Image (cartoon, rainbow, N blue to C red):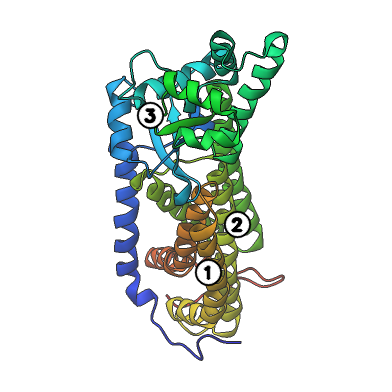
Amino acid sequence: MEFFRNPDIDFLGKKWYFLAFSLVFSVAGVLSMLFWHHIPLGVDFRGGTLVYVKFVGTPDDNHIRASLDRVGLNRARIQRYGPPSNNEVLIALDEKETSEQALDKGKTQIINALETSTPEGKPDLNNASSLTIFNYLMDKDPLHPGTDANERYTAIARAIVNYRDRTKGGVLSSFDELKAAAPPEVVAILQQDFFLSNFGVRNVEIVGPQVGAQLQRQAELAILYSLLGMLVYLWFRFEWIYGLAAVVTVFHDTLITVGAFSLTNKELSLTVIAAILTLVGYSNNDTIVVFDRIRENIKMLRREKLSDIVNKSINQTLSRTILTAGLTFLTVLALYLFGGEVLHGFSFALVIGILIGTYSSIAIAAPILVAYQDWRSGRGKRPVAIPAEKGREKVKVKA
């Protein structure tokens, strides 16, 4: 199956447009990483506390940010979590403790920040624990169960919390909803002495900073080793200039992908690093297909200029490139649009990476090969882009 039939596009003739495009996005990404958003590392790398909050209605990010700033949480990161209809927000705090006290501290900080209109002396039922509800019921004793009070009120407190967290998703919008989980007398007395905020803290998680630093080093080493391995493989498979061109291409793809995360202020997590490593192999595979066709055509078209051979090779593999890249792109695009918040960073990296990886195999890798060959020819040196053949000297190609 062919997407294009005998295409004849002068890709090398447009190399300056390609260079300008790459420079704009590369420089923008670098400037963002250095001066604007920097590299927005996720909690996996920097360490901290993750607080999952569910709201009764649609959360207002600006209001949440203002509330956090009011209590001194200026470096907190706010991110929508799950489907929009769930009204859930993930708030990342730069807490460095890893103890149980840090879990309570992070939860308390968020509650104090978001509860802007708290009735004096009344606890919040949406963020109350079963122990708090139990102690209150034992003190008020609305049912007068006598000797069974401890067991009865323990069961009611647990039923209220389970109904709130499991049935209602972590937040109650009115006291009437409690009638399905507690006796009317209990609901009535809770309504007198408790209030309902418009949010509930569903969960709190902690990642220690030492673990984060170790993960960051391992991620950097994984990317470095993959680039070195690719360079060595292509050096032996073709010639060293092929390997160098492929490594420069992958570095270009990685730089633009990470720059896109910085420009959009999206966090880099472990799943994003996995996506970037996937893109290293994906971009390399596309580049090798083009290089292999260039090597075959060099043997058959020895009298033609290398730039013409490279153009012909790219055109010959264009249908294959568009078909494979297009199918992969549609898959990851669906993952980005419908995969949910958990896979959002991973799928975003794949969407950007596949577009840039396909583009760079055509617009970056091959022009580097031709540019180096022209440079050597200008200095009177023999070309190195031609594969060696046993028992023969390398054949020169007209520059």
Pinpoint residue 164: horizontal percent, then vertical percent. Answer: 55, 33
In the rendered structure, which disc, 3 or 2, sits on the residue that comes first in sequence?
Answer: 3
Distance from the alpha carbon under mark 1 to that under mark 3: 34 Å
Position above or below: 3 against 180: below
Give the SS element for disc 1.
helix
Mark nearest the camera among 1 and 3 is: 3
- Residue 330's disc number: 1
Task: Name which residue lies at 49% across and 48% down.
Answer: 345
Position above or below: 101 against 263: above
Position above or below: 375 against 258: below
In the rendered structure, which disc, 1 or 3, sits on the residue that comes first in sequence?
Answer: 3
As shown in the figure, which amino acid type bears the numbered disc 2?
Answer: Gly
Pinpoint residue 117: horizontal percent, then vertical percent. Answer: 30, 24
Pinpoint residue 58: horizontal percent, then vertical percent. Answer: 37, 45
Question: Does residue 371 appear to the left or right of 210 in the view shown?
Answer: left
**Looking at the rendering, which quadrant does residue 273 occupy?**
top right
Q: Nearer the viewer, residue 394 or 129?
A: 129
Q: Nearer the viewer, residue 113 or 159?
A: 159
- Residue 281's disc number: 2
**Looking at the rendering, which quadrant does residue 223 occupy?**
top right
